[in-house]
Image (spheres, coloured by chain):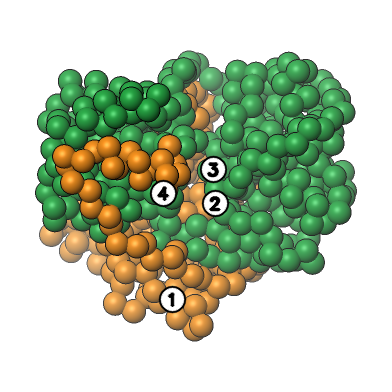
């Protein structure tokens, strides 16, 4: 089974978010980058499928050299090889096109991406890859089993969940539930040593076209200090919510 | 050059997020001096379709034989119905997240998700969106001739007037490559991503049996219930109720956090709520830094009092 896991390198959730160049660019100074949390579930699921059915797990990332530490981490967790498409992604379309153009040339059974990245939260890349490669796409996946050539999945929908099936190859947008959080793999010393010698190919993209452009960033207005209300005066809270905040 | 809007329905009726998208579409249409055409998928009765006129839709095309969960067919029919339109509006729901990316490739349209503002400019589309797990707001500009704008639920006001819309039917039949084998819906309850008020509780509640009072409070407020990650991990509440970084992202008008300390991963999922209330025994709980109102106290003491007070005002 040939599995491709799309990985995004994102700022750790606890990072302070700042911008530079007149607030037009994300300031990566002093920021710790990690594997996008949604992608981690997909990577572990890919490892489990490989252990069960054999095959190969490739991780793919679009980005400049700064994303390589996160890719090495994915190799240390157990991916067999990595592919970096050497360009700075400009929008979802440029990212999806770069990945689809490269993957079109390969025999693939399953592509796993995260349902969104925790930085730009666009959630559009896996669906775009699906359309560009003419594959079925199952988003917000919380369960996946493979039987012969069929993928059986559980996905979240508005107000519930759905059991679906489709033929391979297909692409999924994964999240927590794909595997349990307690089963997420972390790199061990042996994995880290092995990762150093695993192949990490750098591919130049055919083009880098974008359809939308980031203009400027701002931070939400700072909140006023929390108004504390005495625990014996709950009626005051209700009255503040009714008359001051006007939310109930 | 009409503005198109996808009017998503659930069991034959429209919900608030659909009316938000329609209101957004008609405001955009005003800015560009054009009209609004809605596309509805699945079986929706005429009297429901007519309602769209009150929110500014001029014409609705009802594709009764297309299932909205079949994104491949949905994107295809939408693409066939575009004509000369350049702008397509969605509400950023689960099914929109599957359809819009496919449609954007077919149209070669720039796709912007999580939008929280109308376009600032009539000559080019320039909108604000949530980014970095709501820790920042990004202004983006569409470069392509065509655009798909997907609106964050609960970020745009529903504008209702009275109006009429023309209804046409499209009988195209299509089936995609995904087979639905079963569905489980939590019907009857208020959908978490759309709810205006969310009552959420954490490990401070000590056990699943104590959610009775949380549900009673939510009922009185017309709120949806949610929980923190540890609570869904231990299995006290279903995963579908987990809000936070790896769970759902919500943006209600009022978020009440009971016995939730307020870890940064939890706040990432709730920090664009308009008003937040924290109730916690620990005065040092980080949630008090993010909240607008707070009570340092025991949930088992405070919640029954809140219920009592709310019953009085009913």
* B164 w.r.t. B262: above or below: above
- The subunit letter for the residue under badge 1 reads A
For the residue carrying disc 1, how many other residues have a C-alpha within 10 Å: few (<14), some (14-19), or many (20+)? some
For the residue carrying disc 4, how many other residues have a C-alpha within 10 Å: few (<14), some (14-19), or many (20+)? few
**Which color is chain B depicted in?**
green
Q: Residue at x 79, y 46 (%)?
A: B3
> Tag 2's secondary structure?
strand
Q: Which residue is mark 3?
A: B153
Q: Residue at x 43, y 57 (%)?
A: B134
> Tag 1's secondary structure?
strand
The image shows residue B50 at horizontal and vertical percentages of 78, 24
Which of A191/B69 is in front?
B69
- The subunit letter for the residue under badge 2 reads B
> Tag 3's secondary structure?
loop
**Which color is chain A depicted in?**
orange
Image-quadrant location for residue B81: top right
- The subunit letter for the residue under badge 4 reads A
Q: Residue at x 43, y 27 (%)?
A: B222
Q: Residue at x 50, y 35 (%)?
A: B194
Q: Nearer the viewer, mark 1 or mark 4?
A: 4
Are discs 4 and 3 less than 8 Å apart at CB? no
Q: In 3D space, how far apart are the residues under numbered discs 3 and 2 (Cα atoms)? A: 8 Å
Q: In 3D space, how far apart are the residues under numbered discs 1 and 2 (Cα atoms)? A: 20 Å
Q: Which residue is mark 4?
A: A244
Checking the image for residue B263, the label placed there is none
Q: Which residue is mark 1?
A: A19
């Amino acid at each position: 089974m040939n599995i491709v896991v799309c990985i995004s390198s994102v700022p750790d959730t606890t990072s302070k978010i700042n911008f530079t160049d007149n607030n037009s660019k994300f300031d990566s100074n002093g920021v710790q980058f990690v594997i996008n949390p949604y992608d981690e579930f997909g990577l572990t699921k890919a490892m489990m499928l490989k252990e069960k059915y054999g095959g190969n797990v490739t991780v793919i990332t679009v980005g400049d050299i700064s994303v390589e530490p996160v890719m090495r981490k994915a190799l240390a967790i157990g991916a067999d090889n990595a592919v970096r498409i050497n360009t700075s992604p400009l929008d979802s379309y440029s990212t999806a096109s770069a990945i689809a153009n490269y993957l079109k040339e390969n025999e693939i059974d399953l592509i796993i991406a995260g349902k969104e990245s925790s930085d730009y939260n666009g959630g559009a890349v896996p669906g775009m890859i699906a359309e560009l490669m003419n594959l079925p796409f199952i988003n917000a996946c919380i369960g996946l089993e493979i039987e012969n050539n069929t993928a059986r999945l559980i996905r979240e929908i508005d107000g519930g969940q759905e059991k679906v099936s489709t033929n391979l190859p297909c692409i999924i947008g994964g999240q927590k539930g794909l595997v349990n959080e307690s089963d997420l793999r972390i790199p061990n010393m042996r994995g880290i040593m092995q990762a150093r010698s695993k192949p990490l190919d750098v591919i130049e993209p055919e083009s880098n076209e974008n359809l939308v452009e980031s203009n400027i960033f701002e931070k939400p207005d700072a909140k006023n200090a929390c108004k504390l209300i005495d625990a014996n005066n709950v009626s005051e809270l209700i009255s503040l919510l009714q008359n001051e905040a006007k939310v109930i | 050059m009409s503005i198109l809007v996808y009017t998503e329905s659930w069991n034959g009726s429209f919900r608030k997020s659909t009316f938000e998208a329609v209101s957004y579409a008609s405001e955009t249409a005003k800015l560009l001096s054009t009209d609004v055409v809605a596309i509805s998928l699945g079986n929706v009765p005429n009297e429901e379709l007519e309602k769209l006129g009150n929110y500014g839709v001029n014409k609705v095309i009802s594709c009764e034989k297309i299932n909205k969960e079949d994104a491949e067919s949905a994107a295809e029919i939408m693409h066939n119905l575009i004509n000369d339109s350049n702008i397509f509006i969605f509400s950023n729901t689960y099914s929109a997240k599957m359809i819009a990316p496919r449609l954007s490739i077919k149209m070669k349209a720039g796709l912007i998700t999580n939008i929280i503002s109308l376009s600032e400019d009539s000559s080019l589309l320039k909108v604000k969106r949530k980014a970095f797990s709501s820790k920042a707001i990004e202004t983006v500009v569409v470069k392509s001739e065509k655009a798909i704008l997907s609106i964050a639920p609960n970020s745009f006001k529903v504008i209702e007037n009275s109006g009429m819309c023309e209804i046409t039917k499209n009988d195209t039949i299509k089936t995609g490559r995904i087979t639905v084998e079963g569905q489980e819906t939590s019907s009857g309850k208020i959908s978490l991503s759309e709810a205006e008020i969310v009552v959420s509780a954490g490990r401070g509640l000590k056990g699943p049996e104590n959610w009775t009072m949380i549900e009673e409070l939510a009922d009185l407020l017309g709120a949806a219930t949610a929980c923190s990650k540890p609570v869904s991990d231990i299995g006290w509440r279903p995963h579908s109720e987990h809000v936070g970084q790896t769970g759902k992202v919500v943006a209600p008008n009022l978020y009440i956090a009971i016995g939730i300390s307020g870890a940064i991963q939890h706040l990432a999922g709730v920090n664009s709520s308009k008003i937040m209330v924290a109730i916690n025994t620990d005065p040092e709980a980080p949630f008090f830094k993010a909240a607008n109102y707070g009570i340092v106290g025991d949930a088992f003491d405070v919640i029954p009092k809140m219920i009592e007070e709310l019953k009085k005002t009913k």
